[in-house]
Amino acid sequence: MSKTQRYAGFAQVHGAHLDPADMDAATGLVQLSGLVQGIIAAASERHELTPVQAKLLCVLLDGPKGMAELAQCFAVEKAALTGLVDRAEKRGLVERIPVPGDRRAVRVTPTEHGRRAAKAFHTEADGSLNGLIGHLGPADREQFRAIMAGIVARCRTSPSTS
Amino acid sequence: MSKTQRYAGFAQVHGAHLDPADMDAATGLVQLSGLVQGIIAAASERHELTPVQAKLLCVLLDGPKGMAELAQCFAVEKAALTGLVDRAEKRGLVERIPVPGDRRAVRVTPTEHGRRAAKAFHTEADGSLNGLIGHLGPADREQFRAIMAGIVARCRTSPSTS
DNA sequence: TATTGTTATACTCTATAACTATA
DNA sequence: TATAGTTATAGAGTATAACAATA
């Protein structure tokens, strides 16, 4: 591995070119993660969403959720959700619906506009992500997919770091 | 694929469990990227760095850089670098060194403390990332590495999305 | 005139701590 | 008392626009 770019390459730096044969697995993971985040950022922006708003809306496509529930989904403090939902509400992406029978609680629900934006974002990001692996043959692609799925599943059972 | 968690799973949500055989490639990429970012965040935090500061220091380990050069590395506006370097300087991680012969320019240089923190961060993150694929056999690991390296290299030649 | 870097302003995201209202 | 959610405050990161100093 080229010593001069060892750290910079690891850190997912724009313009740090490495020979593919020369890139170790950790560097590959960092670089690949950067590409994925870039795709998500670009797809969000094209639909006038922030990445966090896109994520929020994708979660809400599976059904309305309370603030505390969302905070747990996102692994952030519930106080952070207030601002997040405030901004999304101001943009007409979501609504706070009161819960009958519990006057403390609300259900955060996507508006029709929010739903459309979320689906468009999802379609576009999904396409770009699949494009990332579009050059692979079917066998490679399936093995790559299976290895990724295995890594993720394994981390759910022993979430040592995340 | 389980329809009820299609979007939430895609969005890398804490607690959205999917059967590995049921996870498509795009979802795997998003989830894997989330794990990588989590590892970087955790390793940064353990050395009292923000992820961006860790990245900045890793870049600077390869040599001092000017503000404009760093802005290009990070793909952000140079105005953002001012605050970034201000905060890193306030924490004693970097210094602005004047450039002899050009009184406009500075070289951002890591302090000894910054260098140590960067190396410790790098070692730890590298270890955690390798742990992510530690369960794979040598053949799988090498193929996974090679596929990742190929994806990254391919995106550098045609950076369609990032 | 072009380049280097900063300042001013605004927005998003997040954390902590303290708080209100309801259960 | 416990739970649901908000407010207040602070800090990090980023963008845009305008600016200063130097080349």
Image (cartoon, coloured by chain):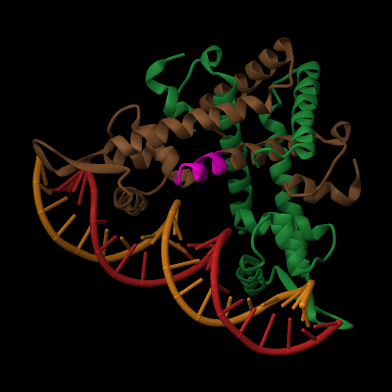
Chain colours: A brown, B green, C orange, D red
Quadrant into which the N terminus of chain A falls? top right
Say if A40 sits above or below A153 in the image: below
Tell me if A138 is positioned left or right of A53 in this view: right
Left or right: residue A98 compared with residue B38? left
Estimate the x, y position of residue A74 in percent, counting from the top left.
42, 40
**Magenta segment:** A40-49
Give above or below for A1 relative to A159.
Answer: below
Q: Between A116 and B133, which is closer to the camera in this rendering?
A: A116
Residue at x 56% of width, y 31% of height: B30
Seen at 63% across and 73% down, the residue is B86
Q: Position of residue A108 (x, y in %)?
A: 26, 39
Q: Can residue B16 be seen by looking at this rendering?
A: no
| Image location (x, y in percent) of residue A141 | 69, 16
The magenta stretch spans residue B132: no
Q: Quadrant of the C terminus of chain A?
A: top right
Q: Quadrant of residue B14?
A: top left
Q: Nearer the viewer, residue A72 or B2?
A: B2
Q: Residue A47: within the magenta?
A: yes
Residue B51 visible in the shown view: yes
Secondary structure, magenta segment, majority class? helix
Give the residue drawn at x 63%, y 69%. B79
Picture coordinates of residue A66 (x, y %)?
26, 38
Q: How many labels were placed on the picture? A: 0
Check the image and report above or below for C4 versus B144. below
Quarter residue A97 falls in: top left
The residue lying at 73 percent from left, 64 percent from top is B114
